[in-house]
Image (cartoon, helix red, strand yellow):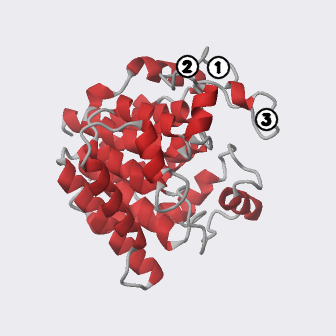
Amino acid sequence: MDRTVKRRILACLKGIAIGDAVGKQTETLSREGVLRWYPDGVRGFEGPPGTAIPRYVGNAKRVWRIGETTDDTERTIAVARAILEDGDVRHRSVGRELLKCTKSVHPGVTSLWEFHQAGDPARVDQRHDGCGAAVRVAPVGILYRSDRLEDIVVGAHEASIPTHGGPLAIAAAAATAAAVSAAIDGAPPPEIIGLAQRAAAQAERQRSGWMDTSFGEALRIIHADLGRHSELQPQDVAARWFPEGPLTIVPLALALGTVMQSAEAAILLASNVGGDSDSVASISAAILGARYPETVNDEWYAVVEKVNEHDLVSLAENLNALRC
């Protein structure tokens, strides 16, 4: 396998974990809330690794730590484990691995709570439309080359349906997997976003039965808007495309992943915007890590690895061997 591809796969996985951990510091905050907690903005990990993120001290659900990754990375690794077990993507195997995940399993995250309460690895969800599927499907894009669009769309569907079965969720997952695949193949930005749009449209039409594709249209609009700016500022992005729903979170992340040129810069931008900052930072950095591996901050990754012990190097090696 091409050493460049291997390097892109590892940088993609590193981008996911780093974006997740840095972005968690501001998740759910408004742009104004970000500045209240971080008057100088988020510049990386804001405090000693492993200590509590200040705003989560005393949190009844979980005291998240600086450098700790969330269920986004945990479930990405679960999808990867299922793929490594089967050599392809099967929803029952994905479900089996997802049931081993423990983070964010509470009634406040309905999709995960219902799945874990059912306890059935073969469960097929019919309705949830959040971004929880998109944030874990990068291994599907790593497994399949970008010329295998049909396999990418099917694989994204299989990886999604244990917890997310709504057409927007399936579209977001297919678009993300396609973008990751194209980025690993070294495709230029227009091809990456074009493939993501095609995958999203195909997946959404198959799931909804409608010809109109809401996700694809949102992706087109946000990508075109951000592409008009030579420099993106958090306050401007927050004012126009604050990431708080199915038609802003993943479209914004995919747009950032194709209009920006640095995984580190995208992570900081998303973290300083707020909203679903960890998801946006994670997805955009997955794409940008694959496009520009040298822009992944290895000092930040060292923090993530020390706190979480994910061993993404071994995971990347194993996935690289399966890419087809």
In which image quadrant can residue 201 be found?
A: bottom left
Q: Considering only order in the chain, which callout, 3 or 2, is on the residue closer to the N terminus? A: 3
Kind of residue at badge 2: Lys
Q: Can residue 12 be seen in this view?
A: yes
Does 199 appear above or below 238? Answer: below
Residue toward you, 109 or 86: 109
Kind of residue at badge 1: Gly
Task: Quickly name the residue at label 1.
Answer: 50
Q: Which residue is drawn at 57% across and 65% down?
A: 164
Instruction: Residue 306: give its label.
Output: 2
Task: Quickly name the residue at label 3.
Answer: 59
Density class for disc 3 (Cα within 10 Å; few <14, some 14-19, many ≥20) is: few
Kind of residue at badge 3: Asn
Percent from the top left, x then y, of residue 134? Answer: 47, 55
Instruction: Residue 81: give its label.
Output: none
| SS for dot 1 | loop
Residue toward you, 169 or 43: 43
Density class for disc 2 (Cα within 10 Å; few <14, some 14-19, many ≥20) is: some
| SS for dot 3 | loop
Percent from the top left, x then y, of residue 294? Answer: 27, 26
In the displayed structure image, the side of residue 131 where residue 187 appears, left or right:
left
Q: Can residue 87 be seen in this view?
A: no
Asked if disc 2 and disc 1 are in contact, CB closer than 8 Å, the reply is yes
Q: Which residue is drawn at 43% across and 17% down?
A: 299
